[in-house]
Amino acid sequence: MAAPTLEVRNLRTHFFTRAGVVKAVDDVSFTVERGKVLGLVGESGSGKSVTGFSIIGLVDPPGRVVGGQILFQGRDLARISEEEMRDLRGNRIAMIFQDPMMTLNPVLRVDTQMIETVLAHKKVSAEEARQRARDTLGMVGIPSPDERLKSYPHQFSGGMRQRVAIAIALLHEPDLIIADEPTTALDVTIQGQILAEVQKLAATTGTSLIWITHDLSVVAGLADDIAVMYAGRIVEKGDVSAVLDAPLHPYTSGLIGSVPSRNKRGEPLRQIPGMTPSLLNLPPGCAFRSRCPRAAEACLAEPEIRELLPGRQVRCFHPLSETSEQAA
Amino acid sequence: MTVYLVRRLLQALLVVFAMSVIVFVGVYAIGDPVEILISPDADQIERERAVQSLGLDLPLWHQYLVFLGNALQGDLGRSFVFNEPALKLILQRMPATLELAFGAMFISIVVGLPLGLYAGLRPNSPVSKTIMAGSILGFSLPTFWVGLMLIMVFAVQLGWLPSTGRGETATFLGVQWSFLTLNGLSHMAMPAINLALFKISLVIRLTRAGVRETMLMDYVKFARAKGLSPARVTFVHVFKNILIPVVTVVGLELGSTIAFSVVTESVFAWPGMGKLIIDSINVLDRPVIVAYLMIIVLMFITINLIVDLTYSLLDPRVRLEGKGA
């Protein structure tokens, strides 16, 4: 097998605030193969977005990548200069943001915002750049792209804006796209269209995707692999259907249980009690133990992530084994 | 766009009319100019003749209608003191005030924008902190005191710059301007800087606040994620957004600078409109006061209109609303 597009090893991104050090990303490792989709799942504040920003090198102060390696096609992005990083951004690695209403500059026309992206990385004429912008807009399903290029962002609907943002991400046919909850702000039908569009594009261009979301149903339909984050750490990862069918970590199981579904109709929805802990001064040991039904004395120590089954990793002392029933 | 413009102009007309009533009644309430204008030893008949010739014997509403009728024909009355058309008096002084105000505006933008931009981009650097501390001084030091200090240092002690008057002028478009001659410019330097000081601080603070706010926006992060150079992000994506509040405030400030540069004009004996209005108020020269205030109203309306139009150039969202109207 060819080298993976992205290999993140023991990534640590900390925020140095006045109140103390916030370990937003703490010892995160994962791999994204070429043309594959990794779903990065977790609650708000679990560090999934910061992981994305760490990869593309846009963690703003007081945050900083303090350790680990981000190997993109063999190059460690944590070590290269800002210049080299800028060369990759928008070119080989692209990012799509959560709120399409906010990602496009309201005072610049769509063509300005697209053409500048082309010209930032390719020495072509403005006319060729416009051509490329128009083609890409057409590719993401925007009707009459020629006309739309001359429009301002506020003349588009939310779904259309997200398509424009995706088109911008695709301008240079990147090897990796980091999508930070790109469909959360859209309604379901638009969400479906965009997901289908992205899936098709990833399959045809060999682009790898990191899809950051808290929506398990999106991951179930889209991702090849899944990594579940909790309090800055990955608590479970593996093949998406294997993990969702038989979660090993109590947190994953809780997440799945929190999703309403037809065959659980009438039963009260199972929730995870309590709240995500503050990442500031996180107590030692397993971060989930205060909310965990299986917590015991052993959980006061820090669990290491380990390979429990082939291709299945989990950070827990008392994983739900495959045979035991899920409702534990 | 045309509909928008017509509607704005109609609104403007209404404002001018309302203001004329307020100004007229207000000035009438200040005092009776007869006491000041007519020599105390004039007898009753002379007195009455003078009152009649000035039109002061008519009831207020009648005086107003006469004023309105004349104003519509471009006649804002004659000065009691100079016995010249009030409009002409004011227009004679206007270029001096205008060039001073525009000079001050120019300085405040040229100095304020870059400093504000720098302070916004590097909020924690010592230079930025110095800039911000300086801007507090610019805000809080009284204009007349700064003016006096400038005169003391640069005119009296160093002898670099002249402290009074407009200096040599050159004619352009039939009007005398100081900024066209070197000597005139040297006369303009101190009053313009004096007038600009407050505005520099204002522009610095506005720009800095705008930059800091805009830098946090998702579209700036997205622009960086596109791999654009920092210069492009700052000067295209951030700059165009912060221009909107800056243009508004600078525009409105321009109006008030023209209207109320009285203090600076007095300190530097700059023969502008501000000095004229103060003198006129002292002798209750009603037509001049009314004419001056009417001109100021018109000017504010014009500036507001220009600001709004600039808006629509800067912010596409405003443009669409205009079209839909």
Image: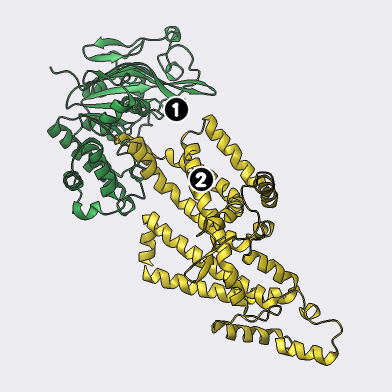
Chain colours: A green, B yellow
User: Which residue is nearer to you in this view: A271 or A252?
Assistant: A252
**Could you tell me which residue is drawn at 59 percent across and 75 percent down?**
B18
Nearer the observer, disc 1 or disc 2?
A: 2
User: Does residue B152 appear anywhere in the picture?
Assistant: yes
Give the percent coordinates (x, y) of residue B291: 62, 75
Judge left or right: residue A324 versus residue B90: left
Residue A167 in the image, given as x and y percentages of width and height: 23, 42
Residue B204 in picture, x, y percent from top left: 53, 44
Q: Which residue is mark 2?
A: B111
Question: Between A105 and B309, which is closer to the camera in this rendering?
Answer: B309
Q: Is residue A128 above or below residue A317?
A: below
**Snapshot quadrant of residue B81:** bottom right
Quadrant in the picture for residue A5? top left
* Residue to which mark 1 is pinned: A61
Q: Chain of mark 1?
A: A
Residue B87 to residue A50: above or below = below
Q: Is residue B57 above or below residue A296?
A: below
Name the residue: 54% across, 44% down: B205
Identify the element where label 2 is drawn.
Answer: helix
- Tell me where residue A266 appears, x and y as whole percent: 34, 35
Front in this rendered view, residue B36 or A247? B36
Callout 2 amino acid: Val
Secondary structure beneath dot 1 equals: loop
Residue at position x 48%, y 45% in the image: B113
Pinpoint the chain carrying mark 2: B
